[in-house]
Amino acid sequence: MAKKKTRIYENPIPVKNGKKEMTDSMYEKLGDMRLMLMTTMAEMGISAEEYDSFLKSDIDREKIKKTMLDMSDYPFDDDFEEYEFEDEDEDLRPSLTLRPINDKVVPMADADKKSLRIKVQMKDVSKPPMWRELVIPADFNFSQLHYAIQAATGLMNCHLWQFQRLAYQPDLQIGIPVKDEYGYGLEEWTHDADKTPVTAFLAKKGDKLEYVYDFGDDWIFTVSVLEVMERDEDVAELKKWKCDMQPIEDCGGVYEYCRLRDIAENISKIDKQTKKEVVAFYGFDNFDMFAAWLDEANIDPEYISERLADIPDEFEDID
């Protein structure tokens, strides 16, 4: 039998001599508290370097802890008794909404005369990889870049989306802020996509962000700047691509996409029993209908060009 590992916590809250020993329940609650604190630090954008600098500083941490305890209504007694919060069903989401970190972003000075050659590559897909190479006007905002990616990948603008340095890391969240309680948009954001120029974050070769679309299926694309060019066209253009199959809305995300791609590549070799299983799994009446659905997912450069030529200046609300 494997030996049970002992969980060790750094610097738990002080336990004075003579107090009873910490129980497993207390350590578990301490673990929850540490997780909440680390989540708060991440939400506030505190970097590892900033935290390390704080630990090495001569700040009077005991005084700060005393102030925090004086301000707190939480009963930190020896037994960590459960605290009954009032109005447990109260929706606290509005109080969690992040405000913009920095309204004053600096775009490329001559963005109206430049274009960006970018590569949009789906994460976690290989052999072959799936990517699209685009040239976009450098004075696009992030809503326009969103539309360009949607067009190039065959997606239909049905779900929430955001641009980040790394997917789901909250230090940067560029998207459409929610306007009302039941409206479309992000509840947590740092920059409004309509008001944020692409070159505030993607301005030179090698700059990268991650684009997250549909927080259920979790399509994640790396957006990389390949080249800054003199402006030739005033609309976005598809230049190259790898892998003909586009992502399919609501199919289940990247892993289901890879499965469907494998089926499409070997569709002529599928036996009757497998066809029955595939039809039943995906909810089609027959295999021909399923095959036609897959065929519709193949890239259509002409349709992509039409969509790229019709990108609005700002995000248009989804009906």
Image: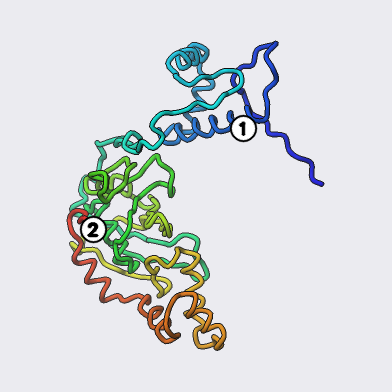
Number of numbered markers: 2
Q: Where is residue 101 drawn, in percent x and y?
A: 32, 35
Q: Quadrant of the C terminus?
A: bottom left
> What residue is pinned by disc 2?
318
Marks 2 and 1: CB-CB under 8 Å? no
Q: Secondary structure at mark 1?
A: helix
Front: mark 2 or 1: 1
Residue at the spot 21% in from the left edge and 52% down from the top edge: 139
Residue at the spot 61% in from the left edge and 21% down from the top edge: 79
Please indicate whether residue 76 sits to the left or right of residue 164 in the image.
right
Which one is in front, 199 or 55?
55
Residue at the spot 67% in from the left edge and 14% down from the top edge: 19
Q: CA distance from mark 2 to mark 1?
A: 44 Å
Q: Secondary structure at mark 2?
A: loop
> What residue is pinned by disc 1?
28
302 in relation to 187, above or below: below
Q: Where is residue 288 drawn, in percent x and y?
A: 42, 87
